[in-house]
């Protein structure tokens, strides 16, 4: 995937004519290992060979606009009305982001009117646009200690023009969309509809998802909290499997198309013998298949622990890929149940009747409050989002990229899916830790499309 400078350029609503209330804080700021000055840029790539591969002068290689406060801003804070919504699946840290946005807008920029739209994009329909939550620093003071979102969320599509009508009707100048890939796509269409109508409304995305499937962000907020919680279930199942004859522990974790939660939780628990993720197809039967490996493992060690991303092995299920949810996301078949049944039948047939311990924590990994790391991350993303919006950036998301905070055009945020790279160092760590074979079944020619920036 080749990216050109225009792909990385963030749209600006207009000239920045107002002094920022934060200007004093910025007077001595310059780029350092710990700060990227206004106007400086953050490199897309970070190895010598990748940079050299462009054959371009260093100031022309692909780079992101740095996030952070600007000395001059586009919006007059006294006249700004901001809107906030959360959409898609729950994710630890949603309330932290809401709180961070409100505090930064109100306390530092002096914005007086902040409107919370309820239940995701549904809140922007004509029917629901007046049923809003008034967001003040007092109203959000304690919300970050709880999981979920005080604004509610939803799946399912709405008409972009109807949503723009709602923004106009409510006098919204800035809309913060806290969402996953679907939410970023919706924000992209919303931004485009606003542009077509010549309106000066900034749309800023704050990327969230426990699946970590969004590109151009080191990790999405909530992911760390979710995989930390998932780790507990792996540890539990490992204890159970170890204490049972021919113990088979299986944990099925969320991860529709990306196996990051399964991979990271397996590494954190350091107790898994096999990790199965959507990115790496596997076969059940045959000498190189999963079942034969499970049998060998149980014979050698007396037990086996399998961590499974819910989206793994979907091709093994009948009718896979046929149904979608209201947002157009694939509805998954239950690979956990298939594995449980196949392993039971196979081991019983091999004279190793197993004791199966199967846990599907499902929503339990995402409905929790953010951990300390994610809490900091959410707050800093919220600050970056407010600075971007007040400066007049639009159709952009804020993200952390190679440890720096940057602005990513929404179109880029939705241009691809972040997945575990079978040739990357994360998966190598999983293989080193589990000692499982690189593939179950005949080696296949993997698409190299996934190798890239994430
Ligand atoms: N291509 C799209 N165009 C417009 N809206 C979309 C699109 N994809 C998703 N959405 C909307 O974005 C919202 C969030 O999407 P969803 O996939 O449910 O969650 P997430 O944002 O967590 O990925 C939903 O209301 C959905 O209808
Ligand atoms: O919330 P639902 O509709 O049950 O969907 C569950 C899905 O949501 C997720 O938790 C997160 O998905 P999103 O990032 O798209 O919201 C997935 O891991 C899981 O497959
Ligand atoms: Mg999604």
Image: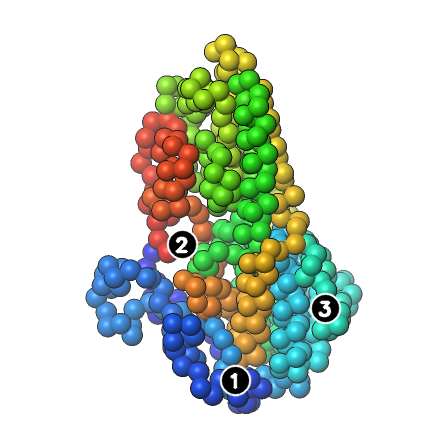
Q: Position of residue 120 (x, y in %)?
A: 67, 59
Task: Categorize mark 3 by other alpha carbons within 10 Å: few (<14), some (14-19), many (20+).
Answer: some
Going by the image, does 168 lie left or right of 409?
A: right
| Distance of label 2 from label 1 (alpha carbons) | 34 Å
Residue positioned 69% across, 59% down in the render? 145
Using the rendered view, name the quadrant where residue 337 is placed: top right
Residue positioned 58% across, 51% down in the render? 225
| Distance of label 3 from label 2 (alpha carbons) | 35 Å
Element marked by disc 2: loop
Going by the image, does 242 lie left or right of 290?
A: right
For the C terminus, give its image quadrant: bottom left
Q: Nearer the viewer, residue 319 or 366?
A: 366
Q: Which mark is residue 454?
A: 2
Q: Nearer the viewer, residue 120 or 145?
A: 145
| Distance of label 3 from label 1 (alpha carbons) | 25 Å
Disc 2 under 8 Å from ligand 3? The reply is no
Give above or below for 444 relative to 47.
above
Residue positioned 35% across, 67% down in the render? 43
Disc on the earlier residue, 3 or 2:
3
Give above or below for 294 relative to 322.
above
Going by the image, does 285 lie left or right of 209?
A: left
Task: Categorize mark 2 by other alpha carbons within 10 Å: few (<14), some (14-19), many (20+).
Answer: some
Residue positioned 59% across, 34% down in the render? 236
Going by the image, does 176 lie left or right of 10?
A: right
Disc on the earlier residue, 3 or 1:
1
Q: Can you identify the residue that label 3 sits on?
A: 141
Element marked by disc 1: helix
């Amino acid at each position: 995937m080749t990216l050109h400078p225009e792909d990385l350029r963030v749209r600006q609503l207009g000239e920045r004519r107002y002094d920022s209330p934060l200007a004093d804080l910025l007077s001595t700021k310059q780029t350092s290992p710990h700060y990227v000055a206004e106007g400086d840029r953050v490199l897309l790539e970070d190895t010598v060979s990748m940079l050299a591969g462009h054959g371009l002068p260093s100031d022309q290689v692909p780079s992101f606009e740095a996030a952070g406060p600007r000395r001059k801003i586009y919006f007059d804070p006294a006249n700004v009305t901001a809107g906030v919504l959360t959409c898609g699946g729950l994710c630890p840290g949603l309330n932290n982001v809401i709180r961070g946005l409100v505090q930064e807008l109100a306390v530092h920029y002096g914005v007086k009117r902040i409107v919370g739209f309820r239940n995701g994009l549904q809140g922007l329909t004509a029917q629901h646009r007046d049923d809003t939550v008034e967001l003040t620093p007092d109203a959000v003071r304690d919300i970050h200690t709880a999981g979920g979102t005080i604004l509610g969320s939803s799946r399912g599509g709405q008409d972009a023009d109807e949503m723009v009508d709602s923004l106009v009707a409510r006098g919204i100048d800035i809309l913060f969309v806290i969402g996953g890939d679907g939410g970023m796509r919706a924000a992209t269409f919303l931004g485009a509809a606003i542009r077509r109508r010549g309106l000066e409304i900034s749309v800023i995305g704050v990327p969230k998802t426990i699946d970590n499937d969004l590109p151009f962000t080191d990790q999405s907020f909530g992911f760390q909290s979710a995989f930390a919680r998932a780790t507990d279930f792996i540890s539990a199942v490992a204890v159970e499997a170890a204490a049972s004859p021919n113990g088979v522990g299986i944990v099925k974790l969320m991860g529709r198309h990306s196996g990051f939660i399964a991979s990271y939780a397996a590494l954190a628990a350091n107790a898994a013998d096999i990790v199965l993720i959507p990115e790496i197809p596997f076969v059940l039967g045959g000498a190189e298949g999963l079942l034969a490996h499970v049998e060998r493992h149980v014979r050698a060690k007396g037990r086996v622990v399998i961590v499974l991303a819910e989206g793994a092995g979907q091709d093994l299920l009948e009718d896979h890929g046929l149904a979608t949810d209201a947002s157009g996301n694939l509805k998954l078949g239950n690979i956990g149940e298939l594995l449980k049944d196949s392993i039971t039948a196979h081991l019983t047939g091999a004279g190793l009747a197993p004791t199966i311990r199967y846990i599907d924590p499902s929503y339990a990994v995402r409905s929790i409050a953010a951990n300390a790391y994610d809490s900091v991350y959410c707050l800093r993303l919220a600050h970056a989002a407010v600075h971007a919006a007040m400066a007049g950036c639009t159709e952009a998301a804020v993200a952390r990229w190679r440890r720096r905070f940057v602005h990513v055009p929404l179109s880029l945020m939705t241009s691809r899916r972040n997945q575990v790279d079978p040739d990357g160092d994360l998966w190598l760590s999983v293989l080193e830790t589990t000692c499982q074979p690189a593939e179950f079944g005949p080696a296949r020619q993997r698409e190299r499309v996934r190798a890239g920036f994430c």
